[in-house]
């Protein structure tokens, strides 16, 4: 019933035990997972993994850190990867990151627009990464009519206003293991305000391992801990069950990404 909407299953940290890691996820009740493209190589790897495992789906795209490497032929390759595989269910992760500025901000904004245009051409929902750039992110999404294809703000760690703007655009909000961190009280308050039909969960593994597994490598099985934390964050304050959260977020993921 659980769907982990954001993983990096191609990461080298899984090379020694990828099969066992995926088996643990299945044993934990994770029925579907989406592995994410962040550049050309990881997009190819995501598509390959989705072809190998029937419960894995893929996205293709270029992370804002990596857009400095884009050449014109990259878009042709990404377009072909998406068109050639029915397992590609989203475009991303894309967006803006002004915290590290690994890529020049002006270049980030230009490449963000270009990739939104490609996603619209492919009719794929977008997976948004934004850090210290929420005003520009929302503005560009509006100007590029991203609401026509929809998408998700992944690994949400923004403020109330970003959540409100994202939801008004018709986007989903995805929470990760950050929700379980001791210093995430504000984020937990925001989670209580997200409409039930706009809620998703993810691990962003191998990063952001949730409590009580801090200090270990993250993996899809741990999306259950995110679901468990959400059971106490219902708007009326009445705890629900992991099964109910799994069913709710699973239905939302199937609707957004059009997966069975």
Image (cartoon, rainbow, N blue to C red):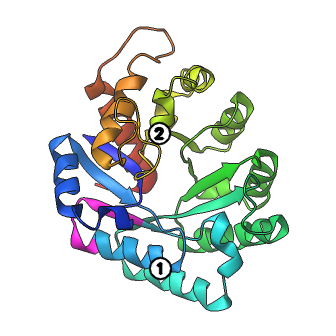
- Camera-nearest residue between 210 and 74: 210
Q: x, y percentage for residue 175?
A: 50, 37
**Element at label 2:** loop
Q: Give the range drawn in magenta.
A: 51-58
Residue 178: x and y, percent? Answer: 51, 35
Q: Which residue corresponds to mark 2?
A: 176
Magenta segment includes 23: no
Compared to residue 215, the image places residue 254 above or below, namely below
The residue at which mark 1 appears reads as 41
Looking at the rendered structure, the secondary structure element under dot 1 is helix
Left or right of 72 in this view: 207: left
Whether residue 53 is in magenta: the answer is yes
Spot occupied by residue 21 in the image (x, y as percentages of width and height): 22, 54
Farthest residue, direction right = 106
Measuring 55% from the left and 70% from the top, which residue is drawn there? 61
The image shows residue 254, relative to residue 212, as above or below, that is: below
Mark before the other along the chain sequence, 2 or 1: 1
> Crowdedness of circle 2 by 10 Å Cα count: few (<14), some, many (20+)?
many
Q: Is residue 176 left or right of residue 18?
A: right
């Amino acid at each position: 019933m659980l769907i982990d909407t954001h993983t990096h299953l191609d990461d080298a940290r899984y090379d020694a035990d990828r099969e066992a890691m995926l088996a643990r996820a299945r044993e934990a009740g994770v029925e579907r997972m989406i592995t994410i493209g962040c550049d050309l190589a990881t997009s190819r790897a995501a598509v390959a993994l989705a072809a190998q495992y029937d419960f894995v789906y893929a996205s293709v795209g270029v992370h804002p850190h990596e857009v400095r490497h884009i050449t014109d032929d990259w878009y042709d390759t990404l377009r072909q990867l998406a068109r050639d595989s029915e397992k590609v269910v989203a475009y991303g992760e894309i967006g803006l990151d002004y915290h590290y500025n690994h890529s020049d901000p002006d270049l980030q904004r230009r490449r963000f627009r270009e990739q939104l245009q490609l996603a619209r051409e492919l009719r794929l929902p977008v997976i948004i990464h934004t850090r210290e750039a929420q005003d520009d992110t929302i503005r560009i999404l509006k100007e590029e009519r991203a609401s026509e294809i929809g998408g998700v703000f992944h690994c949400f760690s923004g403020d109330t206003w970003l959540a409100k703007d994202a939801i008004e655009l018709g986007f989903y909000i995805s929470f990760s293991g950050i929700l379980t961190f001791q210093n995430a009280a504000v984020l937990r308050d925001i989670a209580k305000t997200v409409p039930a039909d706009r809620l998703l969960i993810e691990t962003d593994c191998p990063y952001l391992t949730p409590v009580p597994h801090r200090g270990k490598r993250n993996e899809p099985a741990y999306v259950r801990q995110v679901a468990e934390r959400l059971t106490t964050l219902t708007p009326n304050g009445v705890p629900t069950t992991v099964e109910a959260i799994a069913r709710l977020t699973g239905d939302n993921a199937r609707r957004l990404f059009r997966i069975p």
